[in-house]
């Protein structure tokens, strides 16, 4: 009887000690050292990450470093952060593939997207765009489909990796339109855009971000269609897939996560600073110019978005037997 009481008492003390340690860690943070925001894609695709890093740096009073760890469609950088101490000093940008869907497309994924992170907050939603090299012999989705049907397997399309949004949408387009594309995977959007500029690849379905907007505005690449329910504000003349008769809608999102066990006080503070920036005129306008709509959430709301994302694509991934590298 006494041993049982002692055991319970020790357990309660240990639990209390954990809470005290967590509170002490949060109280000292972020004074000890710089914060690292890992971006799981190549340099050049990190514009939004750098905007947020600057805002966090100002709001937290500590240096925030953006570190690019590209590879496996974002899984390398995301997996790296999952293994870091949950002390608030290592964060990661989160996107649908590595933060949700890879749990179904990548059997050897070295982390659990839904269990190994604290979901700090969403920062934006954006459009997916089908974009082509400027001299590609089609300017509409209908023309592209007709050309691909006449030239099966000859039209090349880039994406950021097997199981990423771009890749899954390319597969869905092939299935819906009855065409065969030659799919090519890359480690980041800048490399895809570079190869389209050189003419060595024809198309890409990718996030409508800074990489593509600059080249589209310069006339070096041409948008064919957006994979949204409505036309993108920044590309009002570009029709949607649905307008071209392809019933396909996919809205990309981005957020920030931390390793599981990061103190809730730290999660709440980062979320607070993020929201203040995103809701400011400066933050809203800078994201708009990058083709994104600010969409701040609470940590709980962002967690639900990630959970719903995995559920949304689960059956589609199984149908097409999508397996990431």
Image (cartoon, rainbow, N blue to C red):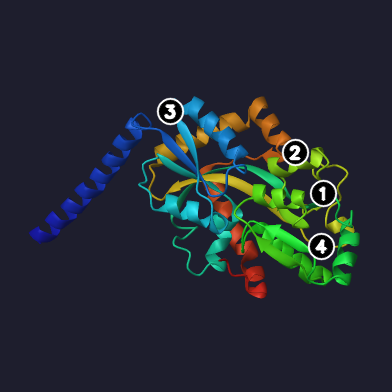
Of residues 22 and 185, the one drawn nearer to the viewer in this rendering: 185
Q: Are marks 4 and 1 in contact (CB under 8 Å)?
A: no
Label 3 to label 2: alpha-carbon separation:
31 Å
Residue 143 spot, x, y in % from top left: 91, 60
Callouts 3 and 1 close, C-beta under 8 Å? no
Residue 306 lies, in percent from the top left, at: 57, 54
Mark 4–mark 2 Cα distance, whole angstroms, equals 28 Å
Per the model, the C-alpha gap separating discs 3 and 1 is 40 Å
Number of the front mark, 3 or 1: 1
Read off the residue under disc 1.
223
Q: Is residue 158 left or right of residue 97?
A: right
Q: Which mark is drawn over residue 62?
A: 3
Q: In the image, what residue occupies the spot 72% across and 46% down? A: 208
Q: Residues within 10 Å of mark 1 (few under 14, many from 20)?
A: many
* Secondary structure beneath label 3: loop
Q: Mark yes or no: residue 263 visible.
A: yes
Q: CA distance from mark 1 to mark 2?
A: 12 Å
Number of other residues with Cα within 10 Å of mark 3, as a class: few under 14, some 14 to 19, many 20 or more: some
Q: Who comes first in sequence, dot 1 or dot 2? A: 2
How far apart are the two marked residues, 4 and 1, measured between alpha carbons?
18 Å
| Of callouts 3 and 4, the N-terminal one | 3
Residue 247, which numbered label? 4
Q: Which residue is mark 2?
A: 214
């Amino acid at each position: 009887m006494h041993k049982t009481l002692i055991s319970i008492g020790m357990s309660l003390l240990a639990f209390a000690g954990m809470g005290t340690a967590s509170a002490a860690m949060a109280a000292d943070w972020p004074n000890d050292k710089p914060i690292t925001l890992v971006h799981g894609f190549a340099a050049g695709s990190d514009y939004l990450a750098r905007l947020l890093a600057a805002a966090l740096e100002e709001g937290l009073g500590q240096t925030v470093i953006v570190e690019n760890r590209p590879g496996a469609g974002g899984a390398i950088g995301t997996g790296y952060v999952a293994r870091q101490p949950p002390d608030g000093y290592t964060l990661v940008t989160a996107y649908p593939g590595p933060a949700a869907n890879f749990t179904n497309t990548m059997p050897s994924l070295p982390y659990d997207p839904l269990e190994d992170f604290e979901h700090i907050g969403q920062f934006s939603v954006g459009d997916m765009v089908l974009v082509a090299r400027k001299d590609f012999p089609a300017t509409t989705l209908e023309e592209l489909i007709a050309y691909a049907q006449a030239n099966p397997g000859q039209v090349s399309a880039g994406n950021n990796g097997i199981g990423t949004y771009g890749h899954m949408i390319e597969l869905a387009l092939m299935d819906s339109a009855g065409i065969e594309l030659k799919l090519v995977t890359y480690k980041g959007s800048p490399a895809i855009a570079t190869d389209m500029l050189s003419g060595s690849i024809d198309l890409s379905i990718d996030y409508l971000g800074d990489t593509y907007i600059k080249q589209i505005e310069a006339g070096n690449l041409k948008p064919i269609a957006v994979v949204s329910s409505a036309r993108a504000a920044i590309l009002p003349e570009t029709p949607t897939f649905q307008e071209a008769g392809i019933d396909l809608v996919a809205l990309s999102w981005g957020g920030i996560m931390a390793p599981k066990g990061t103190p809730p006080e730290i999660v709440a503070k980062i979320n607070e600073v993020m929201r203040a920036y995103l809701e400011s005129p400066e933050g809203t306008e800078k994201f708009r110019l990058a083709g994104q709509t600010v969409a701040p959430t609470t940590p709980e709301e962002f967690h639900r978005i990630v959970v719903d994302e995995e559920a949304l694509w689960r059956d589609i991934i199984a149908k097409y037997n999508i397996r990431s590298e």
